[in-house]
Amino acid sequence: MAVQDIATYTFKDTFSLSVVQFEKACVVNKPEQVDAYSMYWIKEGKGTYNIDFESYSFDGNVLFFLSPGQVFAVDSEKIKEAYKITFIRDFYCIQTHDKEVSCNGVLFNNIYETPFVKPCKADIKKLDFIISSLIEEFQNNETAQYDMLQAYLKQFIVLSVRIKKEDFKIKEDPQTKLFKDFSLLVDLNFKKEHSVTYYAERLGLSPKSITKHFQKNGTISPSDYIKNRLLLEAKRQLIYSDDSVKQIAYDLGFNDPAYFTRFFTKSAQKSPLQFKKEYKN
């Protein structure tokens, strides 16, 4: 969301709610790297956002979710009413609560699906209630405020998961679960481990078996998934760090910077330095 006069409620720099209630058109070309889990509810508005170098347009009531490290920019927007909830792991750990809430890999750390979901009228009423309750609790400053705020945050997350499952008919079959487990493992280890064999062993399968599961699910191959994750991180670091191509190569687990440059050039159709120069211009 563009930098404007936005009312913000915060709790110890670990959890915040920002409220926009006016209509103003704007364009922000400078992308930023997200440093906290972020949930946006555009209740009334339209625009085009750039998330991890991909452009997405919306018009009307939408929810979308960003994870730490993702790149976000506003190409254009005209917002009349919107809410932004941000939190860090110290306030609410999505990994710890994943068995209860199942948001990890569905709302967050899911970088290969369309980020927008549309709530129905019944869901809008529920979201409104949670937002109103959050604002009231932020203003109360009473005993056990942390517990109350966390409870409302959890409600918002659970409802969002249900809305997304309704919108996208998320499967619960073994192939889908395996893809989620694989993608989360890759996200934790891709800087050190580039081989399908490593992840297959961690999941108790052979590389051949995991590839067959991916084919049944209609997704890209495990090898391509790892390559895409490396490419995305390389792009992020080229834009948001001052590290040299050599330093980025080593950080991403490439022992040979020249090999990293060939890998990037083949995948992105331009060299790392060319990509950095074009994107920053």
Image (cartoon, helix red, strand yellow):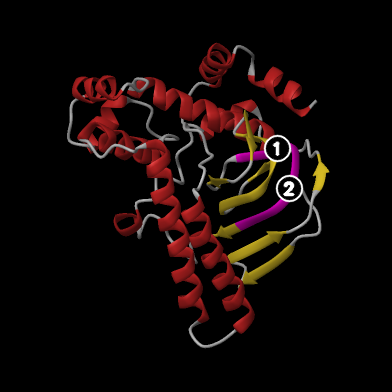
What is the number of the mark on residue 79? 2
Determine the residue positioned at 53% across, 46% down.
65
Is residue 77 within the magenta segment?
Answer: yes
Q: Between residue 279 and residue 126, name the one nearer to us.
A: 126
Query: Which of the marked residues, 2 or 1, is nearer the chain's N terminus?
Result: 1
In the image, 121 versus 157, the foreground residue is 121
**Closer to the camera in the image, 198 or 58:** 58
For this orientation, the residue located farthest to the bottom is 143
Snapshot quadrant of residue 203:
top left
Return the residue found at the far front: 121
Question: Could you classify mark 2 by the number of other residues whose Cα lies within 10 Å: few (under 14), some (14-19), or many (20 or more)?
Answer: many
Quadrant of the snapshot with the C terminus: top right
Crowding around mark 1 (Cα neighbors within 10 Å: few <14, some 14 to 19, many 20+) is some
Q: As rendered, which of 103 and 276 lies closer to the eye?
A: 103
Q: Which residue is mark 1?
A: 47
Secondary structure beneath dot 2 equals: strand
- Determine whether label 2 and label 1 are within 8 Å by CB: yes
Q: Which mark is residue 124?
A: none
Residue 100 located within the stretch drawn in magenta:
no
- Across and down, in percent, residue 114 comes to 51, 33
Range of magenta residues: 71-84
Residue 6 seen in the current view: yes
Instruction: Determine if residue 241 is in view.
Output: no
Q: CA distance from mark 2 to mark 1?
A: 8 Å
* Percent position of residue 139, x then y: 64, 79
